[in-house]
């Protein structure tokens, strides 16, 4: 039922259903899974032209609100930090959208990652400065506006030219990612699904731990 409420953007029903599930003792991990299933359906509708960017933003705001509920956060953070790593997140320059990035931040933090959020409209220079000081394992570059794709390339190029690239994994994410982009040049991974992004980061960190 929760999945259907999310898919249809029935905001009042979503909150009521989440409260009901929590009261019944359903674990937040299961609630999170159902929310994500609904978000995936919205993503499919966006790709097919059945819904618009505004719908993606609204659904992202909803997800952010639910994940920030005290009861959700308390139980989601009760995990074994098997995949602990350091991640920098930022939305590229000239793009001020933060919903997808913030959802990714919640997912990563809940699974034990230390996250430095650079915010929105982040220049390549600011990414570089953060990489030098924070020394992350992973850099997540977010964008929603297709007009900002070139700024994604500029950011990756700046990282490569700085000599900092070899020690990093780069993941690019956001609603602008679609099947028409067969690859994001220079990135190790790209996705329009925050949950998939989390799993990619977990896999990278597990591989790094096994190699150390």
Image (tube, rainbow, N blue to C red):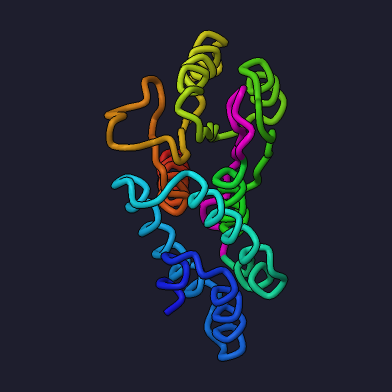
Q: Quadrant of the N terminus?
A: bottom left
Along the line of sight, the residue nearer the viewer: 193 or 39 = 39
What secondary structure is the stretch in magenta mostly built from? loop
Say if 130 sits above or below 35 in the image. Answer: above
User: Residue 49 location, x and y as percent?
Assistant: 33, 46
State whether residue 48 appears in this view. Answer: yes
Counting from the top left corner in percent of width and height, residue 173 is at: 46, 38
Q: Looking at the image, which is closer to me, 160 or 122?
A: 122
Q: Which residues are magenta?
A: 80-97
**Res 88 visible:** no
Residue drawn at x 69%, y 26% is 130
**Residue in the picture at 47% in, 39% down:** 174
- Whether 90 is among the magenta residues is yes
Q: Position of residue 172 (x, y in %)?
A: 46, 33
- Residue 125 magenta-highlighted: no
Q: Nearer the viewer, residue 204 or 13?
A: 13
Q: Quadrant of residue 164?
A: top right
- The residue positioned 36% from the left and 59% from the top of the image is 41
Q: Residue furthest bottom?
A: 24
| Relative vertical location of residue 116 with respect to residue 54 in this rendering, above or below | above
Above or below 160: residue 22: below
Q: Residue at x 57, y 50 (%)?
A: 84
| Residue 87 percent across, percent down from the top left | 59, 39
């Amino acid at each position: 039922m929760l999945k259907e409420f999310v898919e249809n953007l029935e905001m009042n029903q979503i909150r009521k259903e989440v409260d009901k599930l929590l009261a019944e003792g359903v674990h937040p991990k299961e609630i999170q899974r159902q929310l994500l299933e609904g978000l995936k359906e919205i993503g499919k509708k966006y790709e097919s032209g059945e819904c618009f960017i505004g719908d993606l933003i609204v659904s992202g705001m909803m997800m952010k609100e639910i994940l920030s509920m005290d009861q959700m956060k308390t139980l989601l953070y009760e995990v074994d930090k098997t995949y602990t790593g350091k991640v920098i997140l930022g939305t590229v320059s000239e793009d001020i959208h933060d919903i997808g990035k913030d959802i990714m931040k919640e997912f990563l933090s809940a699974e034990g990652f230390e996250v430095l959020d650079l915010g929105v409209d982040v220049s390549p220079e600011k990414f570089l400065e953060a990489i030098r000081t924070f020394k992350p394992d992973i850099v997540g570059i977010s964008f929603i506006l297709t007009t900002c794709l070139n700024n994604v390339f500029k950011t990756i190029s700046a990282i490569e030219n700085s000599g900092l690239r070899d020690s990093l994994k780069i993941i690019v994410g956001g609603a602008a990612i679609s099947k028409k982009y067969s690859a994001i040049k220079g990135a190790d991974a790209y996705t329009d699904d925050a949950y998939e992004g989390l799993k990619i980061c977990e896999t990278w960190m597990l591989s790094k731990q096994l190699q150390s």
